[in-house]
Amino acid sequence: MKNKHLIVILSGITLSLLTGCGEAENGEAPGAGTQEQAAGQVRYQPEFPPEQIEGTPEEGTLGNVVGVPQQPPSLSLPAGAELVSRDKPVTASDPMPIIGDLSYITDGDKRAGEGYYVELMPGEQWVQIDLEAEHEIHGIWVWHYHRQERAYLSVVVQISNDEDFLSDVTTVFNNDYENALGLGRGRDRPYLESRYGKPISVDGVRGRYVRLYSAGNTANDMNHYIEVEVHGIPVES
Amino acid sequence: MKEGSVAVSPKWVIVLSVGILCFGLGMWIRLDAIEHRPLHADEATGARLLADRLETGTYAFDPTHFHGPLLSAFAEPVARLRGEADWESLSPRALRLGIAWLGGLTVLLALAFAPWIGIAGALAAGAFVATSPFLVYYSRVFIHETLFGFLAIGTVLALVAYLNGPALWKAVVLGILAGLLMATRETFVICFFAWAVAGALVAFEHHRRGRPLVPGPVVRRLPRDVLLAAALAFLVVSVLYTGAGSSPAGLVDFVRTFFVYETGEGHDKPFWHYAWMLLWPKQQGGVWWTEAAIGAGAILGFALSFKRPRGDYVRFLFYAGIVQWIVYSVIPYKTPWLVLTPWLHFCLVAGAGVGYLFGGGGIARKGAVLAVVVALLVWHKGQADRATHRYASDTRNPYAYVPTSTDIERAPALIAEMARVSPDVEAGPVAVIGRAYWPLPWYLRGTPSVGYWDSLPEDAQRFPVLLVLPAELARVRESLDDTHTALPRGLRADTPVFLLVRNDIWEAYLDFDDE
């Protein structure tokens, strides 16, 4: 009993001691703004507040972030367009993913969590869906990973009739603003992942193969896919 | 055999070889690519304190934050030896190198328990310490706990050695180690409390069996040696907490810290959290994570110790580990690294358990025990490899706590590219908006004109680049949605930071390759 009391007392003391740390001012107080005058120009620098040393950050502080759609988005498709990617074969730059299977990408299951996503190696990677015939493509809808609000980096989507994407390549989405993939700087806006996925409207581009690139994400270096839908109309041969 | 030559028994060759193998393995997996993981927020704040010490040559203890002075005092010579003497030049390797060595040297401390837990037990304990994914992970992080664990186990070793054969030098070592432990972090009181309870329980066992509480030779010299050890501990504490006399108030603050220390919010977890983290098998990221074998080994060691000579030392370690574990589990505030020291206690007891099994049977039993232990070690090492490399900054790694995203390492280069297209970026301010932004200051060391604001300043619309924390994003975008483009980037694994670039700079940046 004495021991129990001692533990309780010690717990009370140490509760206020444990590692978390709080916050404290560090560095010098911010200096006043400065102005330099040269050749009729005034160069102004405001005062910059110094950093404050802080303790261990909280887990998962994201909350309700602007940018995640609050309403389900939709795609405008022409009459006759249908889902043409279901259960179609998928290949990838990482042919043997350590987690999941490439077939998850076209299996129609969009749930997050263990067993529903495929994880490719870190850095620049791609997956490629073979529609098994040329299609007029009007929409692509991508779910990378939505268990956590994060953004995938350097997302590029291309369509081609060339399996190796060496010729006849049309880029339909590119937010690789750093040109990390070397496919050119993209002007499409980066976005946060959500359960609604990312719909990409396509203007009837013809092709048999759809390739999706990424280069890690804001949480880690890995590349993930839960599902990709391609909507189109078969091209009469 | 030639006259004058010394015969070395094959047994000792094997023991020495296994000991060296354990230490070598422990060092290797602690040092391998140690600089690759992005800096954790707590490492970055520790680096800031170290940089203050390096740049000013002084230290002032803050009783409300950041624990004791030893971490930065210990890291200072390592950084200086590497020629890194200020905030700008510090590298992750300089920060982590000393900690990794201490983690490896803890393997040697485990081996040094051989007289009390047996040779086979000490080798097994050393192997557990060398490969435990939890211990390996935190041997590669520049925070206090591996240093604390090394000193705690060193203090126990010195205490046990003293009780077995009291000597002046052992009392001196004990006093110095205890002082260093007290200078590491305030939770030394939990260690001291746990050791006191464990000592009392073992003393009670002795009393029930009619054995003396303390060996006769110890009793006679105990008062003198205790005084000496206490005086040395006080001296070490005084020197370190006062910055070698430059800040005398540090000694008062050493006591005051127990009443004024401020903890952060958001770290409360249930009682069983540590058991889940270390013992409960869980599949995350395609990996099965658990160190339940060490827990089971510790229970085995405890159970078998009752019929073993010197088993009371094993029970002392077990009781001390359990008391610490319970205290940390009762306290709602929980971070993984807090149970590192009790886990070291359990590794020693688990080693003793393996030693008991190994020593009590024939060749078949020895072979079976060896095979099981080697298989467990291989599995532990596999987990340790995943924890420290592929999943080093991934929330699916149960040991990685609010890990920093690798993406943040690219932010300075991106801002530098923006500066190439607009001189406004260099003029600044590059504004960080919000709280809980560490380790951003570490990664923005080379970026000119960085300022930190809790909320958006009035004239922010002309700011060229802002880094906005999620909690502030909604308010910031109300003001800057028309003037800036928002780009999500990673800060921590579960917390993005939003890079807002003024639209004229953003357009110039996108056109830059085309010009």
Image: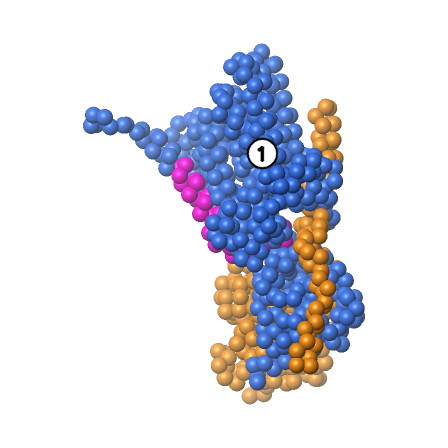
Chain colours: A orange, B blue
Label 1 neighbourhood size at 10 Å, few (<14), some (14-19), many (20+)? many
The quarter of the picture where residue A130 lies is bottom right
Residue at image coords 62%, 18%: B204
Residue B391 lies in quadrant: bottom right
Q: Identify whether A218 is placed above or below B175.
A: below
Q: Is residue B199 rendered to the left or right of residue B361?
A: right
The residue indicated by pointer 1 is B236
Left or right, residue B14 beside residue B423: left
Q: Is residue B40 magenta?
A: yes
The residue at the far top in this view is B210
Instruction: Give the percent coordinates (x, y) of residue A223.
Output: 57, 65
Q: Is residue B443 magenta?
A: no
Q: Quadrant of the C terminus of chain B?
A: bottom right
State which region is magenta: B18-43
Chief SS of the magenta region: helix
Query: Quadrant of the rendered structure where residue B233 is?
Result: top right
Say above or below: A54 vs B510: above
SS class, disc 1 = helix
Q: Chain of mark 1?
A: B
Q: Which is nearer the eye, B226 or B96?
A: B226
Looking at the picture, which amino acid does disc 1 mark? Val
Q: Position of residue B123 (x, y in %)?
A: 44, 34
Q: How many marks?
A: 1
Q: Is residue B31 left or right of residue B204?
A: left
Depth check: give the residue in front, B199 or B330: B199
